[in-house]
Structure formats: C-alpha cells, structure tokens
Image: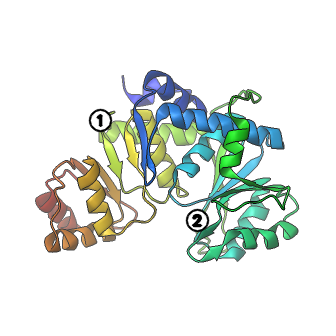
Amino acid sequence: MALTERFAGFNVASALALRATTDPGRTFLITQKGPLTYAEVDGQSDALAAALANLGVERGDRVALILPGCPEFVVSLFAVAKLGAAVVPMNPRQPSSELQYMLRHSEAVCAITVERAEGVDFLQLFEELQVRLPELQYLVTVGEEDLWYDDRVFQFQDLLSAGAGRDYPASDIDPVRDCFAIVYTSGTTGKPKGVELSHHNLVSVAAGTADALGLVPDDRIVGVSALFHVFGLAPGLLSTALAGATLVLEDEPDAGTVLDLVARHRATVHYGVPTLFVAELLEQERSPRDVSSRRLAMPAGAPVSPELVERIRSSFGAKV
C-alpha cells in the first residue's frame, strides 16, 4: 500500500505513534550523541508534551523552535503536535530583529532554543526579548547551564525528567483544518509572512515524497540539516518517519563531513543544494570515500544543470 493511502487522515502525532508501535526498536535518528529509536523519540516527546502542558501550553498555542538540526528539534516538534499546538520553526542564524518580529507576529507563548550558537548567547538575547514580548511566557533551553534564577526559563532535560510518566490532555486534532506549523517566508519583498500549514499539508507532502522516491525502512538519509525549513519538515523529517527509515542529523555539514557520514553510516539517500553536490564532487576527487551505498541523490533548492546531474551519476553511481 502506498504511504499516501496508508497515512491518509493521519496527523503528525499519530504518524509517529504508528511507527513507534509497529517499529519501536528501529533507529529513527542518528545523532552526534548516538542513535534514537522511534520508541525513544515517542517517549521523550510524550514527556515533553506533559511538561509543556503543565506549564499551560495548550491546543492552538504557538511554540517557537529556534534550534539547529538536533534531536531536541525533532522531540519538540512531536511534543507540540501531541498537544494540538503549532510549531513556529525559525533559523537560529537569523538576526535578532527578525526573530523578535516573528515571535511577536506569531504570538508564540513558548520558545525552545539553544543556549549558544554561532557566537550568539541566546539566554542573554531572550532576557532582552521577553521584556518586549508579553505573549512569550516561557523559554526552554538546550544546554548545560543552571537556570534556577528565573522561573520562566527551563532546561530541556529538566522538562523531560519532570514530564516522564505523566499524562497530558488528549487533543482532538482535525488534520485538514488545524494548523500545525507557521513557516515564515524570506521577506525579500517586505516583512516575512507566516504561512500556515496544516497537519494534512505536511503529512500528505511527506507521504507523496516518500512514495515518489521509493523510501523504505532500510534507507538511511543524509543532507537534511535545515529542519526549520519547509523542505526539512516534510520531505526531510516526516518522509523519513512515514517510511520508517533513518535520518542522519548534522547541523549544516560541509562536503567532507557529508561524505564521511555517507561512508560511516552507509547512507542510501542524499538530499542537498546543488552547490553542496558540486563541493562533494571536488572533495571526492581530492580524498575519495566509499560512498557506494548511496542509491539516490536529490539536489534541490536551486537550478540544477544537466551537466551536474550527469557528473553526480557518473562519479557517485547514484540515481538523481
């Protein structure tokens, strides 16, 4: 049965629940800290959902995710889905003025972010932003710092511990009508615009992509780093989940790192912008890796020349 048929009528949370029930021990994510199975991601997202519900996050609320391509992003995404709330994914590399605008415009009640990234101290940044954003009630941070001094700031791991084994209110989600993600446009012709995407929007695109590419549980996928982007959400993360495959997470890797990941994890599917593939071809000439496991390459996000397609096919032996 095609995945578009199997997952018709599913919401984001129920899609993960099916995988966690049918393939609990299968690896969902390969991270820098080790693998996470479907059951582990499901359990952690249950715990986080319970902790967020205890803080007052409920159906219809908006939760901003300002995170790199890390497992906390994935756990947070599914936790918010289980509450019937909506995620607002943002690029942690965006200027603070744009982050402030999107947080205000989306009326986010909670933000989940890293403590530090790209030289930015997000704890300091949000100490300034929370004064200007009355809707933003809570901040959840991924890191090691002790945050006892502020009763509106919580450490991610502390919330997982606090929510473990606790219940949270079940949400009757309408996949077609209920908004699950607000993804902001680049704002090149004005201020960024928040595009509302339903559960059905994302699940149907993810299932269609997985069917078109022939994704199967044995696939290991690399090249999905920008999880905050609509491609990262649907064809990247959710397509992997619907197919029961494995996603190798790496935040903005360079060509050498991607080739190393392909070789180390025997990756079979590779997404990326065309410039990444060009850089990989040069890197492979300089320092060859065994990338024979890769069966499919999908350059996207910019024009792809016929010459590049042929170079990928001939050098990597992969279907494009």
Residue ID at (40%, 32%): 26
| Residue 308 on image: x %, y % | 21, 67
Nearer to us of marks 1 and 2 is: 1
Foreground residue among 40 and 243: 40
Residue ID at (58%, 65%): 91
Helix, strand or loop for disc 1: loop
User: Which residue is under mark 2?
Assistant: 91
Residue ID at (75%, 40%): 51
Q: Quadrant of residue 192?
A: bottom right
Foreground residue among 189 and 277: 277
Foreground residue among 116 and 100: 116
| Residue 206 on image: x %, y % | 46, 41
261 up-or-down from 166: above or below: below
Residue ID at (44%, 34%): 242
Q: Quadrant of residue 167?
A: top right
Q: Amino acid at mark 1?
A: Asp
Q: Is residue 60 left or right of residue 275?
A: right
| Residue 122 on image: x %, y % | 68, 69
234 up-or-down from 37: above or below: below
Q: Which quadrant holds the N terminus?
A: top left
- Which labelled disc corresponds to residue 218? 1
Foreground residue among 22 and 153: 153
The local crowd at label 1, few if under 14, some if 14 to 19, many if 20 or more residues have their Cα within 10 Å, is some
Q: Amino acid at mark 2?
A: Asn
Helix, strand or loop for disc 2: loop
Mark before the other along the chain sequence, 1 or 2: 2
Q: Is residue 191 visible?
A: no
